[in-house]
């Protein structure tokens, strides 16, 4: 049986002049996201809770964070130490 090389479309590089490309939005830093926020603004993290992009949460181990992305049953959260992927109720 002969194996066929899988086709690829494009060169894999993002084109700056692509009219259909999504505009790049600068993500806020952890300091910008948590500046001026009180403890009441942060939701306690629980795997059974559902989170949305931009929501502030407080994790027992990692501390205060900002939800930067949600996909299915996981969320990407920006903490002071860096980004972490956590589970949620999706």
Image (tube, rainbow, N blue to C red):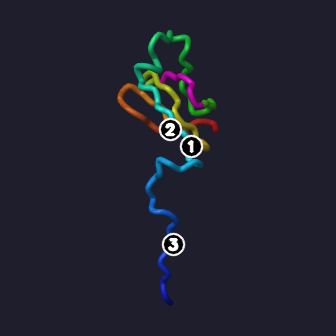
Query: Could you tell me which residue is drawn at 52 percent across and 30 percent down?
Result: 67
Q: Position of residue 26 (x, y in %)?
A: 47, 32
Badge 3 or badge 1: first in the primary sequence: 3
Q: Is residue 8 rendered magenta in the image?
A: no
Q: Is residue 56 magenta?
A: yes
Outermost residue on the bottom side: it is 1
The reply to whether the C-beta atoms of the residues labelled 2 and 1 are less than 8 Å apart is: yes
Q: Are marks 3 and 1 in contact (CB under 8 Å)?
A: no
Image quadrant containing the C terminus: top right
In the drawing, what numbered circle is on residue 24?
2
Looking at the rendered structure, the secondary structure element under dot 1 is loop
Q: Which mark is residue 22?
A: 1
Q: Does dot 2 land on a helix, a strand or a loop?
A: loop
Q: Real-space Cα distance between discs 3 and 1?
A: 25 Å
Q: Residue at x 58, y 36 (%)?
A: 88
In the image, is residue 36 above or below residue 75? above
The residue at which mark 3 appears reads as 7
Among the 4 quarters of the image, the one containing residue 73: top right
Number of residues whose C-alpha sits closer than 10 Å to that of mark 1, classed few (under 14), some (14–19) or many (20 or more):
few
* Magenta residues (range): 53-59
Q: Earlier in the sequence, mark 3 or mark 2?
A: 3
Is 83 in front, or is 87?
Answer: 83
């Amino acid at each position: 049986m002969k194996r066929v090389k899988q086709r690829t479309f494009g060169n894999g590089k993002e084109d700056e002049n692509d009219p259909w490309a999504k505009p790049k939005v600068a993500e806020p830093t952890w300091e910008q996201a948590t500046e001026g926020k009180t403890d009441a603004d942060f939701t306690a993290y629980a795997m059974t809770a559902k989170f949305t992009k931009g929501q502030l949460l407080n994790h027992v181990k990692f501390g205060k964070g900002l939800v930067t992305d949600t996909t299915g049953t996981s969320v990407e959260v920006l903490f002071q130490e860096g980004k972490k992927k956590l589970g949620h109720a999706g």
